[in-house]
Amino acid sequence: MSFRVTVVGIGPGRGEWCTPAVRRRLLEATDLVGYERYLALADDVVGEPLRGRRHVSGNRVEAERARLALDLAAGGGEVVVVSSGDPGVFGMAAAVVEQLEADPARWSGVQLEVEPGVTAACALASRVGAPLGHDFCVVSLSDVLKPWEVIERRLDAAAAAGFVLALYNPRSRHRPHQLRRAMEVLGRHLGGDTPVVIGRQVGRADQQVTITTLAELDPETVDMSTVVLVGSAATRRVTNGGRVHVYTPRRHEEARGCEDDAVGPGASSSREADPAAVQGVWLLTGGARAGKSAHAERLAARTGLPVTVVATAEALDQEMAARIEEHRSRRPPGWGTVEAPVELAAAVDAVSSDACVVVDCVTVWVGNLFHRGIPEGEIEVAAGALAEVLRRRRGPALVVTNEVGLGLVPETALGRRYRDSLGRVNATLAGVADRVVLMCAGRGVELSVLDPVGGGGTP
């Protein structure tokens, strides 16, 4: 007696792509457990009818299937659970382990093994070249086991971070709209000319592979037998001998500074994003409408972390209400927003220290304090408290402010006091910032710390 369950991946369905180890386990099995379609495909992959007893089930009863396999093995069987592709990638391996965790005593005598297989994503990539040549991630668009809001948040973060995406379960009869919505989410960070590869029944006799773009992708051509590969900003097409290849370069283009980042709703980055570069405290300053907020939002999206925007503006008139709505409308749906027109330090401190926080903006906050008659000295104390909160955070903080002293001298005494106070607040925040970026016309340049000059102070 064996008392063993082996979860195998038969690959996409092509005999040559099934490993010898999987083929051997299939031929030795006393019991074969799986979705009817995959069990039939296993015969084709091996090239002969399998002798084990078949235990067929539907495609949405993974937990029941796993329990049956474990019970058969507990009775002494040599049980093989059949998955297509690789059993550990949206396959039955996790379902079996989940059951072992739920009731370890029940199957304590059962030995579990997993034999890998060729994934659908890798099989499709091989048909067109090397689209997965750099960092990539795999996302299932099925919302059976997770909410669609989570899927959208992951798609947004992955695209912003520069990953190539392999989309499994992209479109079904029950959710025909979700692939189109997914393309809209990805379009926040990717240009319409981003290469997309569609593979249907890859590796089988009726295989269909199409190379298209994000803008030209027709969701009606996609079904549950399809895998979709969406390139990153670095993914390219190359024609050789009349054949088109798609590949993503192995080498990451080094960051050249903020000037490479497109700014504005729906803009695409001209270089592959690097989430590791968005760390610590960033202070983004510059003139009005220079692209500071949009750039902060793009940086936040790159982190792949939960994002909370701490907003300081108050809708005191229709114009300000319109500006607030403009900012809100371009943020991803999964982001949180906290209104903090006065108690800014407390609001930032209340955001999880491991999340990314966007403070938008300090200029309006200082104006709110002036409007309430708070003395400049107290404002500077409040700025110091905010700087300390930012300094203690583990996650990245992106702080938006303005340089209001670059133009004409304000006509009124109050205006000059406001200018001076905001300048001191900005200097305080810059003191704890890891990076300070000056924005102008949608482009940015990083500012460096000046060394003391001539034995005096900093100029």
Image (cartoon, helix red, strand yellow):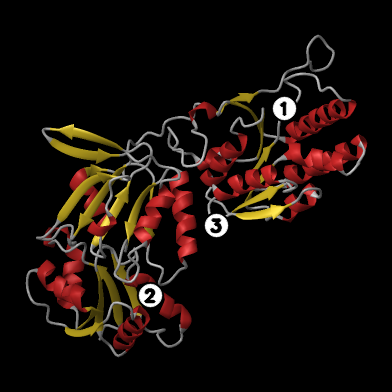
Residue at the image position 11 percent from the left and 32 percent from the top: 241
Query: Where's residue 381, x and y in %?
Result: 88, 40
Q: Which residue is mark 2?
A: 95
What's the amino acid at mark 1?
Glu
Q: Nearer the viewer, residue 146 or 412?
A: 412
Horizontal and vertical percent for residue 120? 25, 58
Is label 3 in a helix, a strand or a loop? loop
Quadrant assignment, res 75: bottom left
Kindly identify the residue that appears in the image at 23 percent across and 57 percent down.
221
Pointers 2 and 3 in contact (C-beta within 8 Å):
no
Relative to 84, is 303 on the left or the right? right
Amino acid at pointer 3:
Gly
Above or below — where is 361 with respect to 25?
A: above
The residue carrying mark 1 is 403
Classify residue 105 as left or right of residue 82.
Answer: right
- Left or right: 346, with 263 as reference point: right
